[in-house]
Image (tube, rainbow, N blue to C red):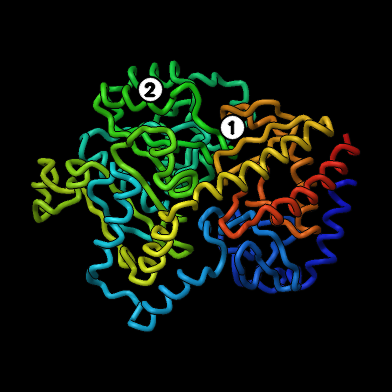
Amino acid sequence: MQVEKYIEEFNKKTRKSKEAYDRIKKHVAGGVESNVRMIDPHPVYLTHGEGQFIFDIDGNKYYDLLCGMGSIIHGHNPPEIRQAVIDRVTKGGDVLGAPTEMIETYAKNVKKAFPSMELVRFCSSGTEATMNLIRIARSYTGKEKIAKVEGSYHGGHDYVLHALHLTEKYLDSDPNNPPCLPYGSGIPKYITENLIKIIPFNNYEATAEILEKNADEVGTVIMEPVMGGGGVIPPKDDYLKKVRKLTEKLGMVLIFDEVLVGFRIAFGGGQERYDVKADLTALSKIAGGGFQVACLGGKKEIMEAILPRTQGTAAEVEAGMTSAVQVGTYNGHPTSLAAGIKSIEILSRPGTYEHLENISDQLFNGIRGQLADKKIVGAVNNVGPLGCIYFDIEKADNWRATLALNEEKWMKLFYGGLTKGVYFGIPHPDERFFLSTPFTEEDIENVLKITDELFDDIKKGD
């Protein structure tokens, strides 16, 4: 079956979504809240979620492998989180503009999972968290340049919207010395040309060469413990530990962006799973229990760079005497903290991650077996309940390798899933899908029956 047939069936099942799209796009750019939510020919407009399912305005029910783009791990509308939010809203859940004692409770819970986060602060999104941490690291080291991984996404601010694609001119560029290309327009050329160095994930020798060569100017290194840019790329050959030792040797601040994997691949995220500690850490998504929370933190002496020391006069700024600014009206919003506190508490209970690992093994090993049985070439990467399928790729252990994936086959999987009742994650072929705790072994079997049918169609098209 061709992609067009699936799209035709998709259109029949989502007529109300098409009508909504035609109305909404007149008022909202692209008819969506974010570019990543755009689907051709139109988005699926949802009404609500319940447990492991989401529902659209046409009444269709889907197994939810999107999970709020990775923000949901307890499923939708979990009773305990719902009650925590209701209790807080009833008490007065709007923004107060001054601190509550809830920030202490939240911080203590986070530090149990991430001991490296000795001091923390709050903001509202992963983008804000990485932006603030980079500023804090620059303030601490006194060095303006940063290094980031080719292919890694760290949010929507100018400093990290680089090296997320390759133009035709650079397709054959040296992977050991990646180019620094801005992702989209509107990013100042000065930032691209002067403030960023790009390093290749899972290639320690090349990473070390770039960092050592630029050690006089680069003071900050930011990376994901598991690369979410390009799908799911786990670290190999102790890459994280080697980079950790190198940054310590060179006096660089190492930031782990755990927005995607924090609390998902282990209670303590990538730092627990791979036994390596960062200087600074960014958390969001699951950290908010489905609500808008981000938490940033790290070593006490580095985080204290945000504490006010002076009045910020021109003379003090020139003398380098001021602190790094970290502010935000909605930082530590009480309702979001209530959801986050309860979410983290539930995750800390015995058996939670064992269940997630079991259903993840069932799903991803099942998919691997189906591809092998049908002789469909494809790599399946997963780290716990976080995974990705790369059609026509035998091994995906670096970002450049993922560029060769077969997009048409992935589109058959995605649109075919929508027609059969599975929402296969973020609607782009180099993205990923997720599992949440309400999934049962029976649910996974149902999903595997659907993937088996879809793989049969994909095989017929070879």
Label 2 Cα crowd, 10 Å radius (few <14 / some 14-19 / many 20+) = some
Q: Which residue is rendered at x = 44% and y = 24% of the image? A: 239
- Residue shown at 64%/52% (left/top)? 425
Residue at coordinates 36% horizontally, 51% vertically from top-left?
A: 129
Local packing at callout 1 (Cα closer than 10 Å; few below 14, some 14-19, many 20+) is many
Residue 345 can be seen, yes or no: yes
Please report contact status of discs 1 and 2: CB closer than 8 Å, yes or no: no
Counting from the top left corner in percent of width and height, residue 421 is at: 76, 60
Which residue has dot 1 on it? 166
Q: Which residue is mark 2?
A: 242
Q: In the drawing, does residue 170 fall left or right of residue 112? A: right
Where is residue 294, by image quadrant? bottom left
> Tag 1: residue type?
Leu
Secondary structure, mark 1, is: loop
* Element carrying mark 2: helix
Residue 135 appearing in the image = no
Image location (x, y in percent) of residue 366? 72, 40
Above or below, 405 against 434 in this view is above
Residue 454 % position (x, y): 82, 46
Sequence-wise, the earlier of marks 1 and 2 is 1
Quarter of the rendering containing residue 346: bottom left
